[in-house]
Structure formats: C-alpha cells, structure tokens
Image (cartoon, rainbow, N blue to C red):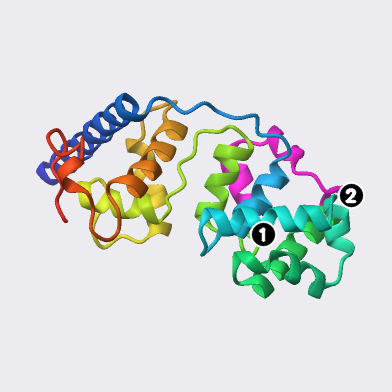
C-alpha cells in the first residue's frame, strides 16, 4: 500500500512538473497555432521521410517526391528506382521507398483509393491497431499522424524531447523513445499536446542542445532543475 501511494505521488509530482514546463514554454515561445491538417496520408508520408534525418532533408525529399509524382497514385505506379531517386536527400532512400510503396498498396487494396480520410471515423486506439501493424509506422510516426494529420491528442517523442525529458526528469533515464510514448501520456496537460511538443522541440534546438547546452540562458532552470548536463 505504501509503495502504491509513493508511486501515485510520484506520478502526481511528474504531472505537476510537466504542467509547469508547459506553462513556462508558452510564456517564452507562445502557443503554437494548429495548421489545417489536410489529407492525413500526406502527413504520414512526410513523417516516414523524416525518420533518421533532419527537417531540411525531409522537406527536400518530400518536395522532390511530390514534384515528380503529383498524385499518390503516381507513386504507387512508379518504379522503385524513380521513387528512390526522388527521396534520396532524406536518407535511407531504398528502405523508405519500399515502405511507402507497401503502405500505399495496402491502402489501395483496403479502401480502393489512396486516402486516409477513413481514419477520421475511428478512435485513436483503433487507428493504432489498424495501421500500426504496417512496417515503417512505429510509435513516433503514429503519434505524428494522430497529432498533425488527424488533430488528435497525441504526443510524439523525438530525439529532442527524449533528451530534454531525461535531463528534466519527466522521462526515466534508461527509457527509450518507443516506451516513452506511452509513459508520458498521463503527464501531458489536456489540450496541450501540440503546444508542448512543438515548444519542447524549439527549446531543444535553441537551448537544451545535445552538445554544449546553453544552460546560462535557460529560462527553465530556476523553476525546473536540470538533473543532467
């Protein structure tokens, strides 16, 4: 019983910490506006292209893909070599091309057209069960689709967020990104998933960098002590 109480208290402390971080980030950076999501399939493919690369390379790969193949049907019908050539700036081109083609083929066979709009009728757990079985769609990709493509409450954990979470103590030190997705859900304030996600990424790029973090200019340090520098 005492152990359970300590665990519950620990979770409440973490929730309070994350709420405080959310407020301080919004005070510093503002509240990000949600952009119209459009076709969820666009977000899914863009997220796959973002895997193991930076935003600039992802954007270049996505632009080249859409410029060469204006419609997803064109990608499905294209030869693998053409897709690989288009997305090469994003890295892992052969693997990503294969996964994109497999996902498009699965959607076409399942729904008869290349659109993920049918996901809007499902709850988030059903969406995870439906497309989470496909190769290339791990926890981060799923949460990005939910958050940015479908406007749901979801919290993708990227390298910036994983690093910051461990430094500030709301993600356990030995936890990997895959497990962190389910771990952090109870601590994110309702309605603040988008704000906390985007502001933490900005904070990670500008201040809490992987190497040589700018601790002297950190606006969180007085309210949320850093456990690891």
The residue identified by callout 2 is: 112
Asked which secondary structure carries label 1, the reply is helix
The residue identified by callout 1 is: 61
Look at the picture and state if 43 lies above or below 32.
below
Look at the picture and state if 125 lies above or below 21.
below
Question: Relative to 9, is 36 on the left or the right?
Answer: right
Crowd tier of the residue under label 2, counting other residues whose Cα lies within 10 Å: few below 14, some 14–19, many 20 or above: few
Crowd tier of the residue under label 1, counting other residues whose Cα lies within 10 Å: few below 14, some 14–19, many 20 or above: many
- Residue 148 placement: quadrant: top right
Q: Which residues are magenta?
A: 110-132
Asked which secondary structure carries label 2, the reply is loop
33 or 180: nearer the eye? 33
72 or 111: nearer the eye? 72
118 is within the stretch colored magenta: yes
65 is within the stretch colored magenta: no
Could you tell me which residue is drawn at 17 percent across and 47 percent down?
A: 215
- Residue 189 seen in the current view: yes
Residue 144 rendering spot, x and y as whole percentages: 55, 45
Could you tell me which residue is drawn at 73 percent across and 39 percent down?
A: 39
Quadrant where the N terminus sits is top left
Predominant SS of the magenta segment = helix
Residue 188 rendering spot, x and y as whole percentages: 36, 35
Could you tell me which residue is drawn at 56 percent across and 55 percent down?
A: 56
Residue 156 rendering spot, x and y as whole percentages: 47, 47
Question: Relative to 68, is 13 on the left or the right?
Answer: left
Q: CA distance from mark 2 to mark 1?
A: 27 Å
């Amino acid at each position: 019983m005492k152990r359970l109480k300590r665990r519950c208290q620990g979770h409440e402390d973490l929730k309070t910490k994350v709420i405080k971080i959310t407020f301080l980030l919004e005070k510093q950076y503002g509240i990000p506006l949600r952009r119209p999501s459009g076709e969820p399939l666009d977000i899914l493919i863009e997220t796959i292209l973002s895997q193991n690369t930076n935003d600039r390379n992802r954007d270049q790969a996505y632009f080249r893909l859409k410029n060469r193949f204006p419609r997803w049907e064109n990608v499905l019908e294209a030869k693998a070599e053409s897709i690989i050539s288009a997305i090469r700036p994003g890295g892992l081109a052969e693997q990503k091309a294969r996964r994109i083609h497999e996902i498009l083929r699965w959607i076409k066979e399942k729904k008869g057209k290349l659109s993920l709009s049918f996901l809007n009728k499902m709850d988030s757990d059903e969406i995870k069960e439906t497309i989470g079985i496909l190769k290339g769609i791990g926890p981060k990709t799923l949460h990005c689709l939910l958050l940015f493509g479908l406007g749901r409450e979801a919290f993708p954990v990227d390298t910036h967020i994983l690093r910051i979470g461990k430094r500030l103590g709301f993600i356990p030190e030995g936890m990997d990104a895959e497990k962190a997705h389910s771990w952090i859900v109870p601590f994110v304030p309702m309605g603040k998933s988008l704000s906390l996600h985007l502001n933490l990424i900005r904070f990670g790029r500008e201040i809490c960098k992987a190497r040589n973090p700018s601790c002297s200019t950190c606006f969180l340090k007085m309210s949320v002590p850093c456990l690891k520098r």
